[in-house]
């Protein structure tokens, strides 16, 4: 499909856990992605590592939000070309058209973006960052173009109508608009029930707004793997 950003792209195997992104770029156009995302590219294209936001921006992603220091940028240099990108872990890819409304993206959620989309590091509210499980810092995507997010497992879009509240587990949260209202709260009325339920703290979003979530909990999966292969 051709986007408003002027690129043609297709999300391959989007109905499974092994999604890939195919992008057709006209000469002179670029796309940026997470480091090591490139699977194939035409010989008319070049890939290079770039610092989004300069050295301070790279350090912010690396030290504050646990993301890669460099992004990779693929450019159609000598002619039109096709590139295929893939996430490092099993899951889906979702395209989100940026119309000027910034989005927050949990660590590990950014996959790729077209020119015109800027990625920076932002600090969350102290309580949300310390107790939400995602850390104090998140990525902020802003500008105009297409943002591609990756998820662990399948992606699910939650459209929250105006006036409605919905509770979302932080470890299933992927991306949400900056201007949506949300608060951190206990999963149950009491602390004991919140802890023993396994949920502890959750986020309460108030519509209107669109929130992107993933079908699997990467923290829970890591703990399961750790239990299967305990250290000596």
Image (spheres, helix red, strand yellow):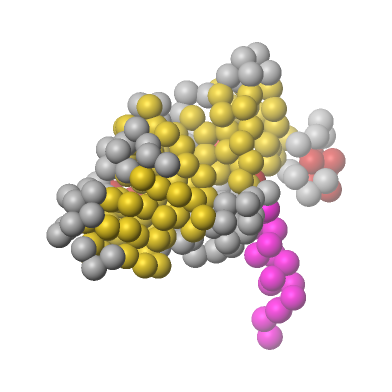
From the viewer's side, name the closer residue of 81 and 103.
81
The residue that appears at 73% across and 35% down in the rendered structure is: 186
**Residue 11 horizontal/vertical position (percent):** 49, 51
Q: Is residue 136 above or below residue 209?
A: below
User: Can you see residue 53?
Assistant: yes
> Residue lying furthest left in this view?
78
From the viewer's side, name the closer residue of 69 and 146.
146
From the viewer's side, name the closer residue of 136 and 206.
206
The residue that appears at 80% across and 34% down in the rendered structure is: 188
Q: Is residue 123 above or below residue 49?
A: above
Give yes or no for residue 223 being in the magenta stretch.
yes
The residue that appears at 76% across and 36% down in the rendered structure is: 187
Q: Is residue 182 above or below residue 9?
A: above
**Residue 12 horizontal/vertical position (percent):** 51, 55
Q: Is residue 34 above or below residue 139?
A: below
Give yes or no for residue 212 being in the magenta stretch.
no
Is residue 14 toward the left or the right of residue 74 in the image?
Answer: right
> Residue lying furthest bottom in this view?
232
Q: Which residues are magenta?
A: 216-232
The mark total stands at 0
Is residue 78 toward the left or the right of residue 62 in the image?
Answer: left
User: Can you see residue 107?
Assistant: no
Q: Main secondary structure of the magenta part?
A: helix
**Residue 156 horizontal/vertical position (percent):** 64, 41
The residue that appears at 42% across and 34% down in the rendered structure is: 97
Asked where in the image residue 6 lies, by quadrant, the reply is top left
Q: Which of the image's four quarters has the N terminus? A: top left
**Residue 75 horizontal/vertical position (percent):** 23, 56
Asked where in the image residue 165 lies, by quadrant, the reply is top right
> Residue lying furthest top in this view?
163
């Amino acid at each position: 499909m051709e986007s408003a950003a002027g690129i043609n792209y297709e999300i391959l195997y989007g109905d499974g856990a092994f999604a890939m992104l195919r992008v057709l770029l006209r000469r002179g156009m670029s796309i940026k992605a997470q480091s090591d995302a490139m699977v194939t590219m035409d010989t008319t294209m070049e890939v290079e590592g770039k610092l989004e936001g300069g050295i301070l921006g790279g350090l912010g992603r690396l030290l504050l939000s646990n993301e890669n220091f460099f992004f990779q940028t693929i450019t159609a240099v000598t002619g039109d070309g096709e590139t295929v990108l893939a996430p490092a872990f099993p899951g889906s890819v979702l395209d989100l058209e940026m119309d000027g409304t910034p989005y927050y993206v949990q660590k590990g959620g950014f996959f790729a973006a077209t020119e015109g989309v800027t990625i920076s590091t932002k600090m969350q509210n102290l309580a949300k960052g310390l107790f939400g499980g995602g850390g104090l810092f998140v990525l902020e995507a802003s500008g105009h173009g297409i943002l591609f997010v990756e998820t662990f497992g399948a992606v699910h879009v939650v459209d929250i109508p105006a006036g409605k509240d919905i509770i979302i587990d932080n470890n299933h949260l992927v991306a949400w608009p900056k201007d949506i209202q949300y608060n951190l709260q206990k999963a149950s009325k009491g602390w004991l029930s919140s802890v023993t339920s396994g949920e502890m703290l959750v986020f309460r979003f108030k519509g209107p707004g669109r929130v992107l979530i993933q079908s699997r909990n990467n923290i829970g999966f890591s703990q399961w793997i750790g239990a299967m292969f305990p250290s000596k």
